[in-house]
Image: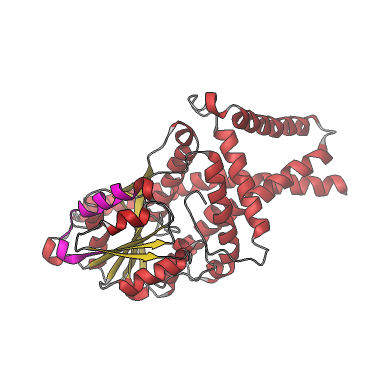
Amino acid sequence: MMILCALAVFWTAFFLVFYTYFGYPIVLFVCYGLVQIKRDWRFLHDRRDRRRADVQDAGLPTVTLFFAAYNEEEHLEEKLSNTLALDYPPEKLQVVIVSDGSSDRTNEILRGVSDARIETVLREERGGKSAALAVAVERARHSIFVLSDASTMFALDALRKLVRHFADPATGAVCGALSFHCNEESGQTEGLYWKYETALRLMEARMGATLTPSGAIYAVRGEIYTPPSPDVLVDDILTLMSVRRAGYKVHYDPEAKAVDFPASSVAGEFRRRVRIAKGSFRALPELWRAPKTPFTSFAFFSHKLLRWVLPVLMLCVFAANFFLLQHRFYRVTLAAQLFVLLWAGLGYLFRQPLRRVRFSLVGYFLVAMNLAFLIGLLRSFGGNREVSWQRGQ
């Protein structure tokens, strides 16, 4: 009986791990390909261009772009220059920047802003990102909100690409495409992972199942946007769910591009993933209840829920394997798991010299990120509520 239970646990958990990393992308690719063939056939039949047309200046909506900043002196001046250089009619753009108790040169930089398009709010005490966003919303004067981060640099036409979709009154939110300006270590870890993640998001978007915006570049109708409550740590995904709940569509536009700076090391990304995991598990009941199409529900289960519980599934595979060692096959599977852990350990110990060797840090990154989600899961059961925030968390 013990062996049968171990076999059931091992293969069920192993299948779900394999499905999450490889099976779902394959299923998604097949569905995406079929939809693309169908759309191409329709194009050949009626010659209609499916792409969303750009909007001329007179037809562009008024936009409020806002973001919160905490100790962002490193990139803030570049962000201000980037914002003022955007190809968007000045009379239709309002920018609101809220400094949330910054203690570096952030406030000094913001005090030097003289452009009429930019409004700054310098909060003396840290109230948290949610409170900062609430202040920004109170200052917003326009119908479309564009949310960003203080370190995110938009392509000059990114605003135009985002807001052109709102010509359709059924559109409630539009997500842009984010890439990263990586250093040697992040390029071998977060950079590689993000290429994989971006491919999944693009295919999901083609199926009408955009789940998570890149919080650094997305737009939403002001009338349906509500600032997150102080205990919410994953406000971007909850925003999309609220848009769907209000009966609007969510789009992903890969032509609306932005570049951000990831955490400089796996350690910095680890802290951010713990925070994301904690917020994701706490928000799970609300996310689960949110209205979704059948395919969106399938994508949410496959791309989000299973990804969040992967550490538990991996532990199940590892633990069950010890009860099956009388068979040679399971001695090989245990050796394979130990090899991955050794790979991760070597990546951690020798991350400086190995960061120039392609794929050498992948094991370290994957183990660290799954450990971060396991810690986030455990912390989600705690009673404390976070309100402070910073880059790298």
- Write the start and end of the magenta stretch as one range: 76-95
Residue 365 locus on image (x, y percent):
56, 38
The answer to whether 141 is drawn above or below residue 113 in the figure is below
Q: Residue at x 18, y 66 (%)?
A: 92
Q: From this viewpoint, is residue 262 visible?
A: yes
**Helix, strand or loop for the magenta stretch, by majority:** helix
Asked if the stretch drawn in magenta spans residue 272, the answer is: no
The answer to whether 127 is drawn above or below residue 25 in the figure is below
Asked if the stretch drawn in magenta spans residue 94, the answer is: yes
Nearest the camera: 349 or 212? 349
Q: From this viewpoint, is residue 22 visible?
A: no
Residue 221 locus on image (x, y percent):
32, 70
Number of disc labels: 0
The answer to which image quadrant residue 57 occupies is bottom left
Q: Residue at x 40, y 75 (%)?
A: 246
Q: Residue at x 66, y 58 (%)?
A: 379
Nearest the camera: 238 or 388? 388
Q: Residue at x 26, y 73 (%)?
A: 141
The answer to which image quadrant residue 363 occupies is top right
Left or right of 253? Residue 283 is right
Residue 373 locus on image (x, y percent):
61, 51
Left or right of 122? Residue 21 is right
The answer to which image quadrant residue 117 occupies is bottom left
Residue 388 locus on image (x, y percent):
52, 61
